[in-house]
Image (spheres, grey):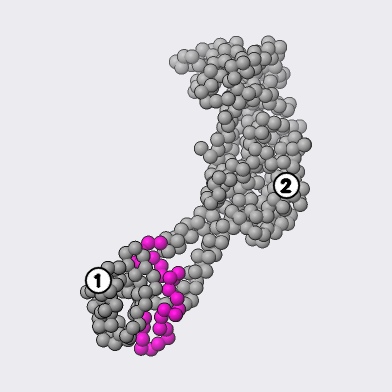
Amino acid sequence: MSEFWLISAPGDKENLQALERMNTVTSKSNLSYNTKFSIPDFKVGTLDSLVGLSDELGKLDTFAESLIKRMAQSVVEVMEDAKGKVQENLLANGGLKEKMKCLKIDLTSFVTHFEWDMAKYPVKQPLVGVADTLTKLSQIEMDLKSRTAAYDTLRLSLENLEKKSTGNLFTRTLSDIVNKEDFVLDSEYLITLLVIVPKQSYTQWQKTYESLSDMVVPRSTKLIAEDSEGGLFTVTLFRKVMDDFKTKAKENKFTVREFYYDEKEIKREREEMTRLLSDKKQQYQTSCVALKKGSSTFPDHKVKVTPLGNPDRPAAGQPDRERESEGEGEGPLLRWLKVNFSEAFIAWIHIKALRVFVESVLRYGLPVNFQAVLLQPHKKSSTKRLREVLNSVFRHLDEVAAASILDASVEIPGLQLNNQDYFPYVYFHIDLSLLD
């Protein structure tokens, strides 16, 4: 499962023994895989500041999770022609442990091997300062909005042009069908018309088109395209009988398409389609990437820049040459999404760790002494039993909360949360099913 439960209990002898009992029961019953979750010691400050910080971190947690889910969905949209490879592009670029710095690791491994990044989020500063560093996710969100808006505009423009190239001969664009050789051009007297003829009327058309009006050029018709309903024929005649020809053609159920060959306009439309197709594809994949140093949303990160000036934040600790080789073949939007998804995901897990610390101090008091544990339920059907085990093992931490879990009518004094969100132990949920 891609679901994790991040819990904590006091670090005294009694509760460490309770944790051991939990590990024994969950292991024997095959309920979950458990590992210690390392959280550094922070400068606690006042309890009043912790209460305010707890609320802010809750909002930041929700925001970060929403952001990475939106970024994951954006990767799906950009990789529409290679959706099977989406998951391999949603990685934590560079582990936090020194030996993992230059690796791309999957999200589950990152969570289970989590270690606080002291360089990016120094623990010597006050907790509020650490939280402020994490709030820089808002800059990624702003960038995401602007980049996806530009991509959506590009995609919609292309879809509108593609719609013109679909449909039947009555509605679709003809610029990709006709050629200059199909028309008499630059003539003061002659003009070439395009006529849609039902398939069952091909023979009738060939027999009658020359006599539909005066001054029709003999043997001037040619079938240049057809669909399931009919064909597109050319016919050349004198300009002064054009209106009379259209009337007679309509009476015989032949439809004249209002189309006049404009070489410049057709070239412009074709080039626009080619450009949009190329631009859209290059957001996912491009053959050449120019790299140079630039600025970054997060401090102390080097940047890759395409010829169009699109900044991408690569993984920390990754050599420049290695980054350049990775960037080749990826379009600017996909590169940006991959790098900044990693940034946001790493920040999100740090937020979870910080929440565990703050809530543990508020719940268990000072001095700081608690043990955090990461549980990965083996299967969905075992989560109810796993919860029962945890509630039983840690019931002594909060008898009222433990009772309220069994009886929803019991209220916990002073607690604003819904009873379903509160347990005798500190608990936070991590769900890595970002594409569901």
Q: Mark 1 points at which residue?
A: 253
Q: Nearer the viewer, residue 386 or 197?
A: 197
In x, y percent, where is residue 93? 68, 42
Residue 47 is at least partly visible in this image? no
Q: Quadrant of residue 244?
A: bottom left
In x, y percent, where is residue 187? 40, 87
Q: Which mark is residue 301?
A: 2
Q: Which residue is drawn at 63% across and 50% down?
A: 336
- Helix, strand or loop status at disc 1: loop
Residue 184 is at least partly visible in this image? yes
Q: How far apart are marks 1 and 2 (CA)?
A: 69 Å
- Which amino acid lies under the numbered mark 1 shown in the image of this protein? Lys
Magenta highlight range: 166-192
- Which amino acid lies under the numbered mark 2 shown in the image of this protein? His
Q: Residue at x 52, y 50 (%)?
A: 80
Q: Nearer the viewer, residue 393 or 212?
A: 212
Q: Does the magenta stretch include residue 176?
A: yes
Q: Main secondary structure of the magenta part?
A: loop
Q: Which mark is residue 383?
A: none
In x, y percent, where is residue 195? 32, 74
In x, y percent, where is residue 257? 34, 72
Which residue, as the protein is rendered here, is positioned at the far bottom?
A: 188
Q: Which residue is drawn at 77% across and 48% down?
A: 319
Q: In which quarter of the image is residue 1?
A: top right
